[in-house]
Image (tube, coloured by chain):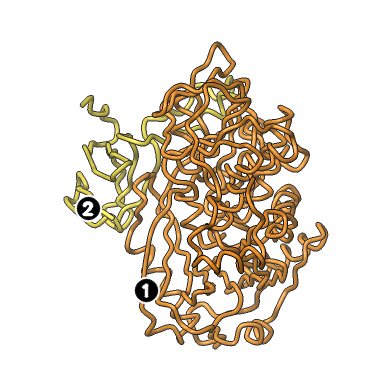
Chain colours: A yellow, B orange
Amino acid sequence: MFLINCPYCGERDQQEFKAGGEAHIERPKQPTELSDDEWAEYLFMRKNIKGVQFERWNHAHGCRKWFNMARDTSNDEIKAIYKMGEKPPTQ
Amino acid sequence: MRNKYSIFSLFKNALSYHENWQRAWKDPAPKKEYDAVIIGGGGHGLATAYYLAKKHNMQNIAVVEKGWIGGGNTGRNTTIIRSNYLWDASAGLYDHALKIWEGLSQELNYNVMFSQRGVMNLAHNLQDVRDLKRRTHANRLNGIDAVYLNTEEVKKFCPIINTSQDIRYPVLGGTLQRRAGTARHDAVAWGYARGADKMGVDIIQNCEVKGIKRSGDTVEGIETTKGFIKTKKIGVVAAGHSSVVANMAGLKLPLESKPLQALVSEPVKPIIDTVVMSNAVHAYISQSDKGELVIGAGTDDYISYSQKGSHQIVEGTLNAILELYPIFSRMRMLRQWGGIVDICPDASPILSKTSIKGLYFNCGWGTGGFKATPGSGDLFAHTIANDEPHKLNAAFNLNRFVSGDLVDEHGAAAVAH
């Protein structure tokens, strides 16, 4: 349980948010040309990192906007929060 | 040679104040090379080693465990055992395990306290009723015992349930599997460890795997905190940390690791002599032999390896417990904890070969792996020894995420296990 600093509403209880899983998974540009292996990779395979992971969150019980987060999954410490469309922080 | 546990050994050791019991397993240093190495000394890993040694004559093997055996999810779950799954593939897998459970204490010469006290699943809305009836029929077609109970029969089977129609989610009925029940989780790990050790398996604790060495598409061994161990076959049974080990070999798995919580109350006199689960309101409860109420909560929706979950998850479960069992309103909770569970997109496990020769994965058991421990070990040992899956775990391969032939147990099993 932790506090999340929504880029639109400020710091709120995690209970108001919905986790959206790994971020920066790009939807295939030409889906009709994808092999079954490539579809599996896109749909199912996940990095599931123990350490700093980039992920999507939604302020479901607030502004309902999506944003990105860099979080250390080994201790739930939030490293950075950045908006959709922005590049992940390098450090 | 280990002595057999019996009434006579108990009597004999009582004479020396129980100070001379032999060790149940050795504490060896790793050898340079093994025929196979199992990564992960939980119930599933130890069972795999046990059946490799017993049924496939592979005694030159090791189990490496980063902490102590049975210290992960094996020692953190709510010990529910059942096999009333919807699909044929799952029914085959889980009932195989249940059949082994029925003779396990005798086979291991170790009391795993398997208790067939029955598991009842409640229905709280019309869709639940339809789903549970469908599942009851599916179970019967697969030779698994299942009965559907109406509200009065639920009340008769477990009198402390509040079956008033005035509560928010009234009990409309339920299913009962009488062969289902519980077992003592630690004893399962210890029994398998003792049995495997007796046949020559090295159980190496406090030994963390740091890397997997490959040459091309074949495994050569593992780097550990106790040095390099050469081996041609690696079985990974690392539960919540499966993806971490897979990353060492350059593989990605269809898993997400999430915290799952459980809690126990102060011990009280016997009050509930079965296991009752409710998917719709997410509450499940049983009572341990010590008298503690054992309550399973849900998973958080975010990925985490922190072994702690959110407070509101526990709160939601306790709200549901109190509505169904008002008698527990003044119970005090003694302990609460979290474990990290590896969840597959179809809520079914993976017992499979991989694209790398000699590397096998047993993972994705999600929130309900304990019940499958003996069957999982047996079938995974078969897969490793023959380099081919057994027919009972053939459907649980990694390739199903490419072919689309998923075993979707979300409806029947994903919430409460």
Residue B282: % across, % down: 49, 67
Q: Quadrant of residue B217?
A: top right
Q: Which numbered circle lies on residue B333?
A: 1
Q: Residues within 10 Å of mark 1 (few under 14, many from 20)?
A: some
Evaluate if marks 2 and 1 touch, with contact meaning CB atoms under 8 Å apart. Answer: no
| Residue B250 in view in this figure | no
Residue A69: % across, % down: 27, 39
Q: Quadrant of the N terminus of chain B?
A: top right
Subunit that carries the residue with mark 1: B
Give the tally of numbered discs: 2
Looking at the image, which residue is at 52% across and 35% down? B39
Q: Which residue reaches farthest left? A: A10
Subunit that carries the residue with mark 2: A
The disc labelled 2 sits on which kind of residue? Leu
Q: Secondary structure at mark 2?
A: strand
Q: Which numbered circle lies on residue A3?
A: 2
| Residue B353 in view in this figure | yes
Q: Secondary structure at mark 1?
A: strand
Can you say whether B193 is above or below B200 in the image? below
Can you say whether B251 is above or below B149 in the image? above
Residue closest to the eye, B292 or B119: B292
Residue B383: % across, % down: 70, 33
